[in-house]
């Protein structure tokens, strides 16, 4: 097997963004007089973009406090979330151990790497820049760049079209069932990491093709597979 393109999910896979997402959500709710909500619960709502997370959080609040329905209106809340997440995105986000090394090593060995996330594109690029990862990626697809989001395979196919890769030489790495389903739907290998969010469910239950214990382990496997196949990158 020779791998030519590896795509990585962002939240919970390359970067720990849970705290700043919860902070933006709670700052937003505070403006509407809603007490702070448990960050762990908010983390469970991550996976389909910041606006989707906020809609799920609002649904949770309104279920417990239906009398807030008059003030907690989606348009008003989402507009304030945009302001707050625009301010917190990238503030406390931290790449998981070995993230930069893994990306650098893959590229040094001729493998192209991309970020495929459901996070809105403007926030994704802000987080990647503030974590020093933006220049280490060959391409980024945020959740609102195309009409379809993960688990639709369109984003992965788009990356492969741009970078010139084939699905049977690609793997998508993620922390959630959505990522596994995306890879499968696209015809790429479904690789997973166990430290992410996945709504609190162990990623093994989504049956990925492989689960890795670190990001550098992914680079090692790819390089070893490509070496065994006899592929050496052109020297530049
Ligand atoms: O921002 C989100 O909710 C999800 O983003 P992800 O696709 O990078 O996990």
Image: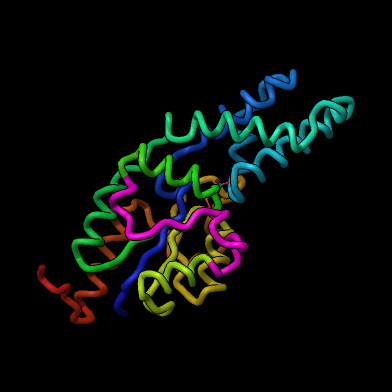
Which portion, as a residue range, is magenta?
133-154
Residue at image position (55%, 54%) is 143
Q: Position of residue 177 (x, y in %)?
A: 58, 58
Residue at image position (50%, 54%) is 142
Residue at image position (53%, 60%) is 179
- Looking at the image, the residue that sits furthest to the left is 235
Q: Position of residue 110 (x, y in %)?
A: 22, 68
Quarter residue 168 falls in: bottom left
Examine the rendered structure and indicate whether residue 107 appears above or below residue 41: below
Name the chief secondary structure element in magenta.
loop
Residue at image position (69%, 20%) is 31
Q: Position of residue 44 (x, y in %)?
A: 62, 41
Examine the rendered structure and indicate whether residue 61 appears above or below residue 197: above
Left or right: residue 22 compared with residue 66 = left
Magenta stretch: residue 151 in it? yes
Examine the rendered structure and indicate whether residue 75 appears above or below residue 2: above
Q: Quadrant of the C terminus?
A: bottom left
Nearer-the-camera pick, 3 or 143: 143
Quarter residue 21 falls in: top right
Q: What's the image's color scheme?
A: rainbow
Nearer-the-camera pick, 193 or 8: 8
Magenta stretch: residue 176 in it? no
């Amino acid at each position: 097997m020779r791998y030519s393109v590896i795509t990585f999910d962002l939240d919970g896979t390359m970067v720990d963004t849970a705290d700043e997402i919860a902070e933006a959500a709670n700052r937003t709710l505070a403006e509407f007089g809603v007490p702070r909500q448990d960050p762990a619960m908010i983390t469970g709502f991550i996976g389909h973009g910041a606006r989707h997370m906020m809609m799920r959080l609002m649904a949770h609040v309104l279920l417990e406090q239906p009398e807030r329905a008059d003030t907690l209106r989606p348009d008003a809340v989402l507009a304030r979330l945009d302001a707050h997440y625009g301010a917190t995105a990238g503030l406390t986000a931290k790449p998981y151990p070995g993230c930069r090394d893994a990306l650098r090593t893959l590229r040094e060995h001729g493998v192209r790497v991309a970020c495929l996330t459901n996070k809105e594109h403007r926030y994704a690029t802000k987080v990647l820049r503030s974590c020093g990862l933006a220049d280490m990626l060959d391409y980024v697809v945020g959740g609102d760049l195309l009409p379809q989001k993960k688990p639709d395979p369109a984003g992965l196919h788009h990356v492969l079209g741009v970078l010139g890769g084939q699905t049977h030489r690609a793997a998508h790495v993620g922390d959630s069932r959505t990522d596994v389903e995306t890879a499968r739907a696209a015809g790429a290998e479904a690789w997973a990491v166990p430290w992410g969010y996945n709504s609190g469910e162990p990623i093994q239950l989504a049956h990925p093709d492989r689960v890795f214990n670190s990001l550098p382990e992914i680079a090692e496997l790819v390089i070893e597979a490509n070496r065994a196949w006899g592929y050496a990158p052109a020297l530049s």
